[in-house]
Image (cartoon, grey):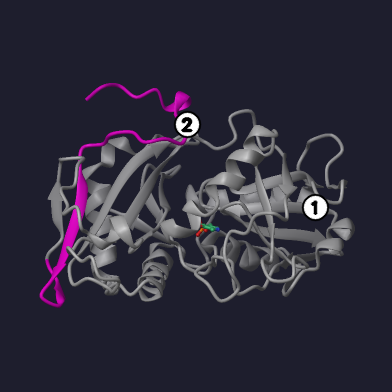
């Protein structure tokens, strides 16, 4: 094996030794199989290629201070994948098979789990696709579950830092009665144009408002949003956002820290009242918001004058990371030690 420079890792594809797979045929899921080939051979009429029968997940495993490997809340990813499957009419992948697949994948790629000191981790990408040949628009009857793993660097190379976001009303990510609550490729395809434009303008991501009224906050690119004010953690309630497991965890930790937690529609003007704001997801845990520029109304909501994250965001970030790296007791039972 080539030596990996853990400090230089970013977030990108990196070949590891094994991937795991499971196929659905004749109405049932088969056994989990271990593969070394990075390619999948599928029929050109597979429904994933034509009609977007595809869902994915993203989770991480960490090498702890004690040398043990911990996977973070994989039961939640398993449940969310089932929900996404229901959303695009694919057979649900059984929860116990998901766990079995993750454990096998992590163990087999154990030497790709970065050392504790590096601040890096092993990112796991499970996906489930329709593979049956089918040209009429309806669900197919053959599916493939695949999961691969890759070491990824710490999101914050120069320390925990803020970044800017932009509101652009000419793009929607997901419709209120559409597929925004599912983790599916289709939502990402729909967000690429806006995302690239935001990047070109120097922003981290697009800050989406609800598609129907453009009145309430939805998501920050592919991350959930939270704001902090008056010792309260406030996060949007919406029918077009993806339920983030990081956000769910931060809500619990916020309560542990003595904050109040509110999940409710957040009018965009309320941004002016937040003391801190952040985007949250598996990749960064928290990506603190420096400012949000409203491109259409030519105004800005500023949360950090000096580019430093707020105190509460910082506390929440370190608290969650401490649990993931086994530095603090896992009182909520969120991690699974892989042995
Ligand atoms: C994956 C994802 C998130 C973050 O979810 P986590 O479970 O915290 O990683 C947020 N929004 C969208 C659209 C996503 O796809």
Left or right: residue 312 versus residue 176 is right
Q: Residue at x 20, y 58 (%)?
A: 45
Secondary structure type for disc 2: loop
Residue 316 at least partly seen: no
Residue 20, how many percent across, how many down?
20, 52
Q: What residue did someone put label 2 on?
A: 10
User: Where 13 sits versus 319, above or below?
Assistant: above
Q: What residue did someone put label 1 on?
A: 276
Q: Residue at x 55, y 49 (%)?
A: 322
Crowd around label 1: few <14 · some 14–19 · many ≥20 (10 Å): many
Residue 290, how many percent across, how many down?
77, 42
Secondary structure type for disc 1: strand
Residue 293, how many percent across, how many down?
80, 45
Foreground pick, 271 / 277: 271
Residue 244 at least partly seen: yes
Q: Residue at x 34, y 63 (%)?
A: 51
Foreground pick, 97 / 238: 238
Q: Residue at x 58, y 29 (%)?
A: 157
| Mark 2 beta carbon near ligand 1 (under 8 Å) | no
Q: State the extent of the magenta-drawn residues as a range.
A: 1-30
Residue 282, how many percent across, how many down?
51, 52
The mark nearer the N terminus, 1 or 2, is 2
Left or right: residue 111 versus residue 159 is left
- For residue 177, which quarter of the picture? bottom right
């Amino acid at each position: 094996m080539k030596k990996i420079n853990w400090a230089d890792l970013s977030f990108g594809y990196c070949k590891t030794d094994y991937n795991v797979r499971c196929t659905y045929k004749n109405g049932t899921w088969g056994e989990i199989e271990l593969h070394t080939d990075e390619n999948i051979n599928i029929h050109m009429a597979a429904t994933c290629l034509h009609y977007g029968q595809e869902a994915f997940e993203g989770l991480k495993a960490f090498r702890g201070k004690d040398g043990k490997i911990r996977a973070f809340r994989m039961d939640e990813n398993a449940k969310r994948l089932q929900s996404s499957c229901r959303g695009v009419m694919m057979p649900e992948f059984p929860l116990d098979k998901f766990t079995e697949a993750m454990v096998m994948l992590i163990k087999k790629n154990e030497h790709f789990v970065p050392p504790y000191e590096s601040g890096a981790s092993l990112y796991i990408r499970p996906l489930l696709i329709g593979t049956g040949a089918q040209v009429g628009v309806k669900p197919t009857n053959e599916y493939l579950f695949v999961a691969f793993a890759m070491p990824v660097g710490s999101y914050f190379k120069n320390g925990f830092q803020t970044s800017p976001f932009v509101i652009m009303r000419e793009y929607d990510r997901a419709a209120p009665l559409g597929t925004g609550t599912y983790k599916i490729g289709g939502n990402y395809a729909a967000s690429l144009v806006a995302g690239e434009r935001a990047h070109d303008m120097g922003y981290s991501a697009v800050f989406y408002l609800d598609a129907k009224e453009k009145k309430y906050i939805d998501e920050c690119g592919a991350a959930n949003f939270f704001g902090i004010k008056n010792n309260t953690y406030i996060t949007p309630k919406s029918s077009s956002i993806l339920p983030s497991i990081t956000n769910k965890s931060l809500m619990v930790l916020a309560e542990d820290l003595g904050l109040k937690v509110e999940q409710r529609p957040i009018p965009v003007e309320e941004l002016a009242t937040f003391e801190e704001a952040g985007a949250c997801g598996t990749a960064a845990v928290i990506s603190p918001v420096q400012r949000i520029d409203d491109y259409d109304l030519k105004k800005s909501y500023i949360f950090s004058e000096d580019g430093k994250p707020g105190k509460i965001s910082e506390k929440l970030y370190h608290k969650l990371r401490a649990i993931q790296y086994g530095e603090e007791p896992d009182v909520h039972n969120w991690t699974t030690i892989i042995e």
